Amino acid sequence: MDRAVAFSFAGVSKTWNRAQFEDSPEGSMDVDDEGLQAAEEAGVEQRQEEAEEALTRIVDKRDFRRMEIVGQFNAGFIIARRRAALLPPRKGQSSGEEHDDLFIVDQHAADEKYNFENLQKERKIQSQRLIAAKPLPLSTSDEVVAMDNLSRIRDSGFDISIDYDAPAGHRISLLAMPISKDVIFDDKDLEELLSLLADRTGREIVRPSKMRRMFASRACRMSIMIGTTLKKTSMKKVVSNMGTMDQPWSCPHGRPTMRWLASLQDERTKRNAPYQNKAFGFKMLTWFRRSPTAEVPGKELKEESVQPSMEL
C-alpha cells in the first residue's frame, strides 16, 4: 500500500547544522568567517555599488527597528549596533551564535532618502490644462504603456486622452502638464516617463528626472542637517525609518546612508574593544572625509574622536 511521507530539505538542513555545532566546539568558525567577510564587503572602504550589494545581503529590513543606538559621531553620524541570532545554542549554552555589528549612519543622507521616498509616493503634482489638446506622435509600444498606466501618468501631473479609433502612433493627445514654480515641464518629460514605466519592475515608483531632482531638493531642505546634535530618540527614529524604505542605501544625490564598521564579536575574540582601536576610528574619519559634505547645508565637520558607551 502506498503511503505519503512528509519530507523537508529545510528541516534536514537545520537538524544537520545543529548536530554539527553541538558535536564540534569549533563548528561555527566557517560561518563566522563567512559572515565577517560579507560584512567587510559593506565597509566604509568599499565602492558604492559593492557596499550596497553587500548590505542587501547582510541587513534585513527588520534589523533597523532592532538596532541599538550607541551614540552620535561628530554631530553628523549615528553609530548603531545590530545584534541578531545566527545559530541555535549549543548544549550547555543559554544562547547561540549571533551577529553583533556596528554600523555608521549618515543622519542627513538617511533622513533625506526617507523624505524623498515619501514625497515620491504621496505627493500628487498639480497640473494645468492646455488651451488645446496636443497630439503626441508616439511609437506603438509607448502608446500601449500610456494606456496601461493612466493613473501613474496623472499622479505625475500629466493628463492624456486616447482615441482608440485613430491609427497606431496617433492615438494619444496631451491635455494637461505638471506645473511648479521652480521647474518647467514639457512633452519630452512625458516621453521620458513612458520610457521609465516601460522598464519598471514591481511596485517601483517612477518619475521624470526633472521631478526627481525637484523632490530631491525639497527632501534635502526638510531633512536633519549635518552638524545637528540629536537626542537618542531622534537617532532611533532615523535608523528605524530606514526599514520602511524601498532603497535605503543611498540618498537621491548619491551619498551613502549607511556602512558597516566592525564586528564586536570579532573584537571580543581579539580582546580589543572597537572604540579602543585606532583603526576603528580611522574607518569613520575615512568615510566622512569621502562623503561630499560640502554640498550639505550645516556646520563644518571637525575630526573629533568618537567615544560611544557600550558593554561588549
Image (tube, helix red, strand yellow):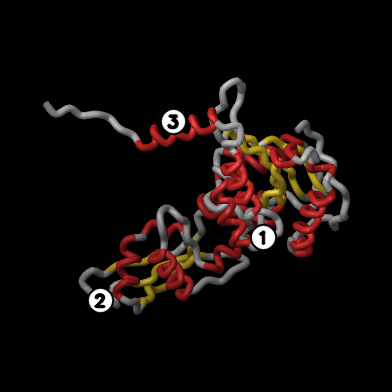
Q: Which residue is drawn at the image coordinates 37% and 66% (left, top)?
A: 160
Q: CA distance from mark 3 to mark 1?
A: 36 Å
Q: Mark 2 highlights which residue?
A: 168
Along the viewing direction, whichever of 301 and 103 lies nearer the viewer: 103
Label 1 secondary element: loop
Residue 123: image location, x then y, percent: 53, 53
Seen in the image, is 194 located left or right of residue 308?
A: left
Q: Mark 3 highlights which residue?
A: 15
Q: Mark 1 highlights which residue?
A: 46
Label 3 environment density (alpha carbons within 10 Å; few <14, some 14–19, many ≥20): few
Residue 256: image location, x then y, percent: 66, 57
Is residue 115 visible in the rendered image? The answer is: no
Closer to the N terminus: mark 2 or mark 1? 1
Along the viewing direction, whichever of 183 and 4 lies nearer the viewer: 4
Closer to the N terminus: mark 3 or mark 1? 3
Mark 2 vs mark 1, foreground winner is 1
Residue 223: image location, x then y, percent: 69, 51
Residue 234 vertical placement versus 122 (above, below): above
Along the viewing direction, whichever of 134 and 281 lies nearer the viewer: 281
Label 3 secondary element: helix
Label 2 secondary element: loop
Type of the residue with mark 1: Gln
Q: CA distance from mark 2 to mark 3?
A: 61 Å
Type of the residue with mark 2: Ala
State which quadrant residue 273 falls in.
top right
Residue 300 vertical placement versus 264 (above, below): below
Seen in the image, is 137 located left or right of residue 125?
A: left
